[in-house]
Amino acid sequence: MSNSQDEPITLSNFLFNKDGKFCLPCTAYRGFQYVTTEMTNRYQVYKNNKLETLRNAQPQVNIMNQDTATLPVQGANNEMIPGSRTYVKEDPPDVQKLGVASWTFLHTMAAKYPREPTQTQKEDMSEFLKLFSHVYPCNWCAMDFEKYITKYSPRVESKEELSRWMCEAHNHVNVKLGKPKFNCDFWQQRWKDGWEE
């Protein structure tokens, strides 16, 4: 190689050997040397910042539902998973957390559905919702959703129809849980475009 490890890397010694000729092995070696040094330095900074952040963790509020705070929470068990430097021990989701995550997924999927889906896309979405109602990990929730889609077939003709159907299905559950209904006229702002400032 053209230079010792102590010499600073310049464009000239990065691309060319000591004779001034282009040197692919020199370039590959210097590139590898630069990247590994840079990544090691960045990782050390990240690791130090992450550990400091976990030590001084403030409560984090989940924007989806203020009743379900996400980790880390001050005073909570901030113990790391064995062998991990980034993941905190967390219990499996309860029905409420599972519901919030599932509805977020379903609404977002509906909002990303094509305006004018093909016949195959329509069939796939109908089949997905049917399967979802069979494999959902909360048995009574799954049975209720299955009953709902049997009584009110998913409207898969367009993004607008599917998103409104999903909102109505969610409101059906909200009523059963004693929660207020969401105004489905705002589905685009909530799940697709965002709220105007």
Image: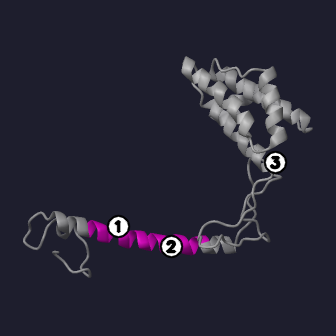
Q: Position of residue 195 (x, y in %)?
A: 68, 36
Q: Is residue 84 above or below residue 192?
A: below
**In whole angstroms, how far apart are the C-alphas of marks 1 and 3?**
44 Å
Amino acid type at image mark 3: Gln
Q: CA distance from mark 2 to mark 1?
A: 15 Å
Q: Amino acid at mark 1?
A: Val
Name the magenta segment's main secondary structure.
helix
In the structure shown, which secondary structural element does the residue marked by tag 1 occupy?
helix
Q: Taking 54 as reference, is 167 left or right?
A: right
Stretch of the chain drawn in magenta: 30-50
Crowding at mark 1 (Cα within 10 Å: few <14, some 14-19, many 20+): few
Q: Amino acid at mark 2?
A: Val
Residue positioned 63% across, 23% down in the render: 159
State yes or no: discs 1 and 3 in contact (Cβ < 8 Å).
Answer: no
Report the residue marked by disc 3.
96
Residue drawn at 24 percent across, 65 percent down:
28
SS category of the residue bearing label 3: helix
Colour scheme of the rendered structure: one colour
**Is residue 6 something that shows in the picture?**
yes
Q: Nearer the viewer, residue 49 or 130?
A: 130
> How far across and down, in percent of the image, does residue 29 sit?
24, 69
The residue singled out by tag 1 in the image is 35
